[in-house]
Image (tube, rainbow, N blue to C red):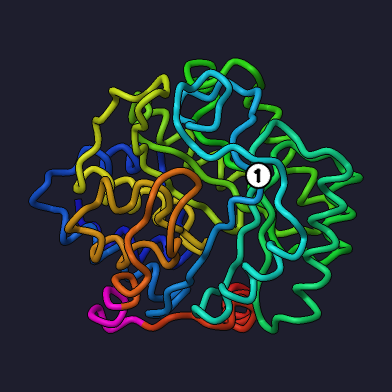
Amino acid sequence: MDWLNLAKNVLDGYQLTREEAEKILLSKDDELLSLVNAAFEIRKRHYGKKVKLNMIINAKSGLCPEDCGYCAQSIKAKTEIDRYTLISKQTIVEGAKEAKRNKIGTYCIVMSGRKPTNNEVDTVISAVQEIKNEVEKIKICACMGLVNEEQAVKLKEAGVDRFNHNINTSANHHANITTTHDYDDRVQTIENVKKAGISPCSGVICGMGETDDDIIDMAFALKELDADSIPVNFLHPIKGTKLENLNELTPIRCLKILALFRFINPTKEIRISGGREFNLRSLQNLGLFIANSIFVGDYLTTAGQGAKEDYQLISDLGFEIEENPFETESQTLAKKF
């Protein structure tokens, strides 16, 4: 396969077929650099050499009634993690200020649980309003589980820029991962935030026993949902969870998956998310030639590498940190239209 020619076609508006998507995942390992280079051409057109930094604050931990097999916060998981109710408004606000000092473009307020209570929504709203008044040029992403239309509208009015709710896996594989909610429940939440005018963020977790067809389904589903930001997580198996013994990914496999998502969703923010350090290991640098966004610092229940290492990685590649996500977003829209 001539990957560079395929990338040029995508840049001209061509949409990948399932057969071509399958060829990316099944490509020979010695084609990897050619594939990465082709994906970089797409990334470079839309995002140049900028890297968007994201940071998570785990605003509510554990205490979740869902049975998601990958998650240490599930009530079914036998894990030793911090468990606490929603942190204070002021702690959320201080976290945003710290994020800004560390050149973070998007500050992610994440809560465990199936769905937020109205009181929890009100606390987050109050915190977001204060952040918007006190912290310049930082994007706020909320991740609060299933939200209804009314809650989504209130979050939008408060200043929430983006809402994350991952589809996690394919519709076909969903029941193998969780049984306490449906795939359609996740899709409905994405539609609710889109209707409210909030930028939708939705992604996946790969390495959970899914097939190549499932991964292709995920990439096309997110294209159909028109998710602006697509976090690609790679399973970091945690002791005490249902998937604790599943470790089927390699760094090369992860890069092929990232390339697939870039080819199918060429204009979208592709973020290497949870499991980056554990699965990509020494090939993290190649991932940034495909993706244009990463998390800095720790994830929800697993540790990330030090921020200084991420900054050094970006610098060594000759890339630069995107410190004003709103400016870059405007440039991307201008190119699109």
Task: Give the amino acid at mark 1.
Answer: Lys
Total marks in image: 1
Pick the residue in front: 69 or 199. 69
Horizontal arrangement in the rendering, residue 173 relative to residue 61 (left or right): left
Question: Residue shown at 23%/80% (left/top)?
Answer: 316
Q: Give above or below for 197 relative to 149.
A: below
Q: Could you tell me if residue 101 is visible in this image?
A: yes
Q: Nearer the viewer, residue 158 or 130?
A: 130
Camera sees residue 226: no
Name the residue located 65 percent from the left edge and 51 percent from the top edge.
Answer: 59
- Residue 152 image point, x, y percent: 83, 49
Helix, strand or loop at mark 1: strand
Q: Whole-percent x and y of residue 3?
A: 24, 57
Say whether residue 38 is magenta: no
Residue under circle 1? 60
Residue appearing at x 56%, y 47% in the figure: 223
Q: Nearer the viewer, residue 226 or 325?
A: 325
The picture places residue 290, in percent across and down from the top left corner, at 34, 62
- The image quarter in which residue 105 lies: bottom right
Give the residues drawn in magenta, as a range: 312-319
